[in-house]
Image (cartoon, rainbow, N blue to C red):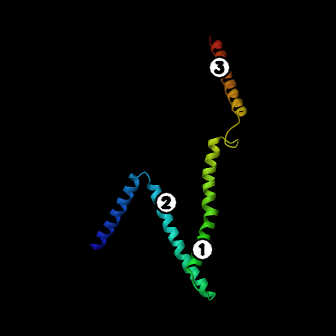
């Protein structure tokens, strides 16, 4: 009985959290922020163990300042290669589409050609329709 209560309690808490996130317009932000903080914490913890192991392998003292410097450098390298690249792709493309770069817009000549072709097809259709009506009379 206690197991079913725990499962129900856990599922109720999960449902309550999901309901709050659905009602909140910033639910995606909170979930993303949560994932970010969890991954950042995991990175710092795993980096600490790797740093301690490396220092012990080289018979060097473990210094917190060196660890912070190394880990911060690693995070910035990661952000430069991944996060900033993605941000440029999203923000840069949005900006270029907004200002109307040549790559994002069709030339006015091409649009005019399309309009002329459409008008020509419509005129041909009207001409064919008039011919059919005269033959039918």
The residue at which mark 3 appears reads as: 126
Query: Which of pointers 1 and 2 indicates the residue nearer the eye?
Result: 1
Residue at position x 67%, y 42% from top?
Answer: 104
Quadrant in the picture for the C terminus: top right
Query: For this rendering, which residue is in front, 115 or 128?
Result: 115
The image quadrant of residue 129 is top right
Q: Is residue 33 above or below residue 71?
A: above
Q: Secondary structure at mark 2?
A: helix
Residue at position x 35%, y 59% from top?
Answer: 16
The residue at which mark 2 appears reads as: 32
Neighbour class for label 1 at 10 Å: few (<14), some, many (≥20)? few
Q: Which one is earlier in the sequence, the residue at label 3 or at label 1?
A: 1
Query: Which of pointers 3 and 1 indicates the residue nearer the eye?
Result: 1
Would residue 42 be found to the left or right of residue 126 on screen?
left
Q: Secondary structure at mark 1?
A: helix
The residue at which mark 1 appears reads as: 69
Query: For this rendering, which residue is in front, 64 or 27?
Result: 64
Label 1 to label 2: alpha-carbon separation: 26 Å
Residue at position x 59%, y 78% from top?
Answer: 66
Residue at position x 69%, y 24% from top?
Answer: 120
Neighbour class for label 2 at 10 Å: few (<14), some, many (≥20)? few
Would residue 91 be found to the left or right of residue 42 on screen?
right
Label 3 to label 1: alpha-carbon separation: 77 Å
Q: Which one is earlier in the sequence, the residue at label 1 or at label 2?
A: 2
Q: Residue furthest bottom?
A: 59
Q: Position of residue 125 (x, y in %)?
A: 66, 22
Q: Position of residue 11 (x, y in %)?
A: 35, 64
Q: Position of residue 21 (x, y in %)?
A: 40, 56
The image quadrant of residue 119 is top right
């Amino acid at each position: 009985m206690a197991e079913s209560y725990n499962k129900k309690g856990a599922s109720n808490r999960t449902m309550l959290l999901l309901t709050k996130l659905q009602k909140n317009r910033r639910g995606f932000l909170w979930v993303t922020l949560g994932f970010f903080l969890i991954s950042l914490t995991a990175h710092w913890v795993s980096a600490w163990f790797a740093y301690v192991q490396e220092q012990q392998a080289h018979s060097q003292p473990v210094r917190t300042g060196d660890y912070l410097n190394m880990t911060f450098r690693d995070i910035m390298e990661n952000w430069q290669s991944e996060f900033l690249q993605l941000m440029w792709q999203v923000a840069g493309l949005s900006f270029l589409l907004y200002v109307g770069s040549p790559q994002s817009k069709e030339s006015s000549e091409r649009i005019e050609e399309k309009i002329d072709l459409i008008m020509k097809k419509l005129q041909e259709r009207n001409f064919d329709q008039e011919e059919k009506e005269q033959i039918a009379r």
